[in-house]
Amino acid sequence: MTLSGKKILIGITGGIAAYKTCELIRKLIKLNADVKAVITPTARKFVTETTLRTLTRNPVYCEQFDVPEWKPEHISLADSADLFLIVPASANTIGKIANGICDNLLTSLVMAFNKPVILAPAMNCNMWKNSFIQENIIKLEKAGFHIIPPESGELACGYEGTGRLSDIDKILEKVLKIFNEGNFLKGKNIIITAGGTKEPIDPVRYIGNRSSGKMGLALADAAYSFGADVTLISTVKVDKPYKVINLSTAIEMLEVVKNEFSDADALIMAAAVADFRVNKASDHKIKKADCSQKLKVGGGEPSIEMPFNASNQEGKEENLALELVKNPDILKEISVIKRDNQVLVGFCAESQNLIENAKKKIESKNLDFIIANDISNKEIGFNSDYNAVTIINKSMNEVKIDKTLKKELAKIILKEIFK
Ligand SMILES: Cc1cc2nc3c(=O)[nH]c(=O)nc-3n(C[C@H](O)[C@H](O)[C@H](O)COP(=O)(O)O)c2cc1C
């Protein structure tokens, strides 16, 4: 195993376990990593710059100001590294990162860093149990930080409990795992769709669905972190380091997916595409008063019409009927042009007969995989950070994954698809 060519920033904060970081640096250097230490001003009280400079064979970074380079240190260091490892992560620094505070070089650097960050917290057991700390840890995990939890045992402060820095070899294992995973989709061009389509009724209103886009975005982030060239086609506006095409409707999505698909190795349709759209959306905002004026909206052949089959107490008509037409089935259309070496993955959200319906879809849409999620469970799925799914392949083999963070689930799904 080697880390040759890998550039690692090791962040050290003001905790008693800082001395153990020296051993971690030694092991990283032995694996040929290029290591640079970034320390908080408090960390200086726990470990010397001379030690760190000698072990890393690089300068040690602590100050944000009074540096010779024109480019701010937190930007140039962030640009230069592949991984940021914060060992030990103090309660204080964890709190700052979770709340976007950047008041020293290390915390500014974390905010500017768009590659994997590992935090290995270490603190007194009562500090670790504190609800603020726990909330911060959950927040960071949700945001995609890798947390290596502290271990139980005797603590330097004399207490016994959970708070001791994780075993150094476990941290090293995590580093190696991230770098190994980091390449497994290199050279693959993957299209992922995300979010729910919005089918216009008029310039103000639309027919939408409850999809938050979280699963699709998690898949796109995971594919990118695994080295893929990602194209995210999304109804949710996001700023990402990979290609994002933002759109609203099913028709637009079909057009873009078709354009992008010829160069792709895989298409993962995580977006919730509306089955129907309004035949002809109104060019003008439909007014409530229109209902009482027997106005037909839509221009030409009326597509939105008032059936005038209900009246209120003043005898005014109150109902509005929308004429809906079927949207194209994007997966079905793509399955016709798909080459044998292209992978087509669909999602299937059902509240009844999940597996049976998912299997039917695999066949009818000629899919390589379908990810089936049961939307009857309120704790998972729409708008939740968690999901539980069954991955089914063409041979109808099933892999069931219990409730998991969507960010983690995305990695499991990609590994299953491309294994
Ligand atoms: C002897 C000593 C040991 C400490 N050990 C820890 C520790 O293990 N974990 C922790 O979160 N804070 C610890 N602290 C408190 C931090 O040093 C303090 O919260 C500081 O503000 C952290 O700053 P930083 O996050 O900028 O490095 C310790 C303080 C002292 C005096």
Image: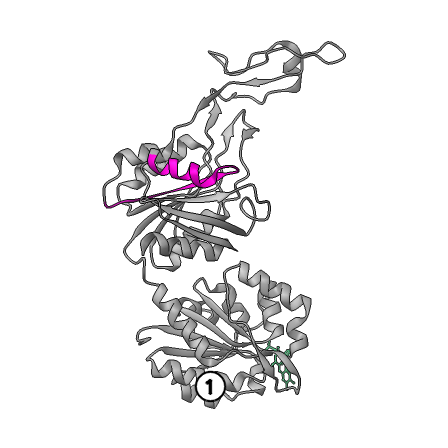
The answer to whether 384 is drawn above or below residue 104 in the figure is: above
Tell me the residue at 53%/59% (across/down): 143
Residue 194 is situated, as x and y percent measured from the top left of the image, at 45, 43
The answer to whether 273 is drawn above or below residue 232 in the figure is: above
Q: Quadrant of ligand 1?
A: bottom right
The answer to whether 260 is drawn above or below residue 302 in the figure is: below
Residue 258 is situated, as x and y percent measured from the top left of the image, at 32, 36
| Towards the viewer: 210 or 287 | 210
Q: Quadrant of residue 415?
A: bottom left
Residue identified by numbered label 1: 22
Task: Residue type at mark 1: give it.
Answer: Cys
User: Local crowd at mark 1 within 10 Å, few (<14), some, or many (≥20)?
Assistant: some
Tell me the residue at 47%/26% (across/down): 276
Q: Is residue 80 visible?
A: no
Quadrant location, the N terminus: bottom left
Q: Is residue 172 visible?
A: yes
| Residues drawn in magenta | 341-363
